[in-house]
Image: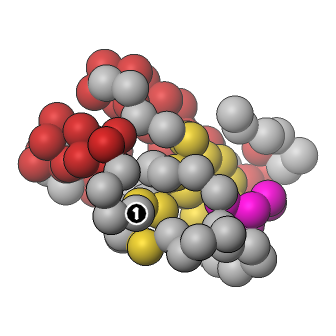
Amino acid sequence: MYTRNGCPFCLRFEREAAPVYARTPEGKAAPLRRVDLPAGGVRGEGLREPVIATPTFVLMEEGQEVGRITGYLNDDMFWGLLGRLVAVIETPQVQRSGAQTQ
């Protein structure tokens, strides 16, 4: 999760979803790591494209981005999107070669 101090949507995520994240099947499959987003964003590091907004949840596998969720509106929407992303890493590599998410 790319985050920034004072980000209201990051704070909302911290209140609504973060307290239970690690205990969910999604959280166990994709442990949450928080990274402060510097001014100007971040590039590289296995990312498909730069991260410029917060919060941005980037799902990585073997050092490469397999999908992302940009923004946070509410926990219902977040869990649905995260479930779709986690399904990507749980699908055998042969079936998903060339497949893209969000």
Q: In which image quadrant can residue 76 be found?
A: top left
Which residue is label 1 attached to? 4
Tag 1: residue type? Arg
Residue found 41% across the figure and 61% down from its top: 3
Residue found 16% across the figure and 35% down from its top: 16
Task: Identify the main secondary structure in magenta.
Answer: loop
Left or right: 3 in relation to 45: left
Give 30 or 58, whichever is nearer the viewer. 58
- State yes or no: residue 19 in magenta: no
Residue 95 visible from this viewpoint: no
Residue 63 visible from this viewpoint: yes
Give 75 or 4, whichever is nearer the viewer. 4
Q: Which residues are magenta?
A: 46-51
Q: Report the quarter where the C terminus lies.
A: top right
Q: Report the quarter where the N terminus lies.
A: bottom left
User: Residue 42: horizontal and vertical position, in percent?
Assistant: 67, 72
Left or right: 80 in relation to 14: right
Residue found 55% across the figure and 75% down from its top: 38
Q: In which image quadrant can residue 36 be found?
A: bottom left
